[in-house]
Image (cartoon, rainbow, N blue to C red):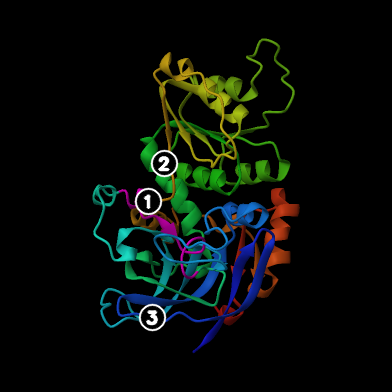
Amino acid sequence: MAVIQALRFHAQQDVRVEDVEAQSCGMDDVRVKIAYCGICGSDVHEYLGGPIFPPLPGQKNPHTGVELPVIMGHEISGTIVQVGANITALNVGQNVAINPSMDDRHHGKEDCSVCRSGRRNLCKSWACYGLSAHGGGFADEIVVKTFSCIPVPEGLSLKVAALAEPLAVASHMIRISGFNHGNDVVVLGAGPIGLALLLLLKAKGTRKVIVSEVTESRSRQAEKFGADLVVNPLANMSDSAGSGNSIVDAAHNIMGDGADIVFDATGIQSTLDTALLVVKPGGVVCNVAIHEKPLLINPNSFSFKEVKLIGGICYTNEDFEDVLMALATGKLAAEDMITSIVPLEKVVQGGFLELINNKAEHVKILIQPSKSADL
């Protein structure tokens, strides 16, 4: 049996690049040679405090049957090197991005009512390649189902295609928020998803975007990516007549009654409070962040302004197709999100520990398997 290299999660702060047995490619499967895989914030959370999404020691995921150790990585681009006998829609040599979200189809089940409604990202049998399934992106290759493969348009590099997953998160949030061309938007936080939101909002025709960010390096990135104004919420207010909240004052100065939509991409009490203050009457606050602890909220803060407070998770294939087409046509210029490319054998020191120790200096670190160095 063939052997591949892969980074596997064994336990908290115990991830190892090691030789593992390659998966077989079934009649309905596709084998993809991985070109690049981005490190997600959730990967770092797993390293520091996991297992969160992977099964607990001695247990198996109820949908995939996977148990520790699991191969990590879910922001994947690569090239198809083998297709199962039943596959007709994809071909060997074709470049693809991988939607790592798994639903009933992946487990051989009939679609549940949620899947039938089009919200496969909310399937009751949800799992994810690189977290709770067999196979992940920090490896030489992965075997997936055909409906997990999103073709990469001609002319788009696999390096940029590896950004499809975080961009798809942003695309999904914008779509469910009800965004319309010409809306005014505030984005709270300029991490990878906050910057992805900014890039897509500019591409989709927002009127004004204000970004809130405390770190200087990420503030510079937000300015570079087209924010109309970047505000440090911790900066001293010089205007004694203001509200005492620099984001609220900036929004009212530029947007009048406030923002049509506020995306909270930070997930702490102060950003939720700011979101509810800065949104205009009848507007939308969309929670994008994953919270480490519960927050306090006064329902009057959205009732009295008739504000909608919503949240979202993951994406569907529609979101991948949206961002890949925008990247291919040049409408979306996202390559500058990539701040480092690290070989798989150095993923811990050059990837995980680099993000832990120098988080503010990076937007997206890509991992490149040694066998794909020619891509």
Above or below, 104 against 78 in this view is above
Residue identified by numbered label 1: 121
Q: Residue at left 74%, top 23%? A: 236
Estimate the spatial distance between the alpha carbons at disc 1 and disc 2, rounded to whole Å: 15 Å
Q: Which mark is residue 25?
A: 3
Circle 1 residues within 10 Å: few <14, some 14–19, many ≥20: many
Q: Position of residue 94 (x, y in %)?
A: 38, 76
Would you identify the image quadrant in which residue 312 lies?
top left
Question: Magenta stretch: residue 133 in it?
Answer: yes
Q: Residue at left 55%, top 74%? A: 139
Circle 2 residues within 10 Å: few <14, some 14–19, many ≥20: many
Above or below, 87 against 105 in this view is below
Q: Nearer the viewer, residue 95 or 136?
A: 136
Tag 1: residue type?
Answer: Asn
Above or below, 279 against 114 in this view is above
Q: Tag 2 or tag 3, which sits nearer the N-term?
A: 3
SS class, disc 3: loop
Estimate the spatial distance between the alpha carbons at disc 3 and disc 2, rounded to whole Å: 36 Å
Q: Position of residue 187 (x, y in %)?
A: 54, 35
Q: Tag 1 or tag 3, which sits nearer the N-term?
A: 3
SS class, disc 1: helix
Q: Residue at left 36%, top 48%? A: 122
Q: Which residues are magenta?
A: 119-135
Circle 3 residues within 10 Å: few <14, some 14–19, many ≥20: some
Q: Position of residue 281 (x, y in %)?
A: 42, 18
Query: The C terminus appears in which quarter of the rendering?
Result: bottom right
Q: Which mark is residue 174?
A: 2
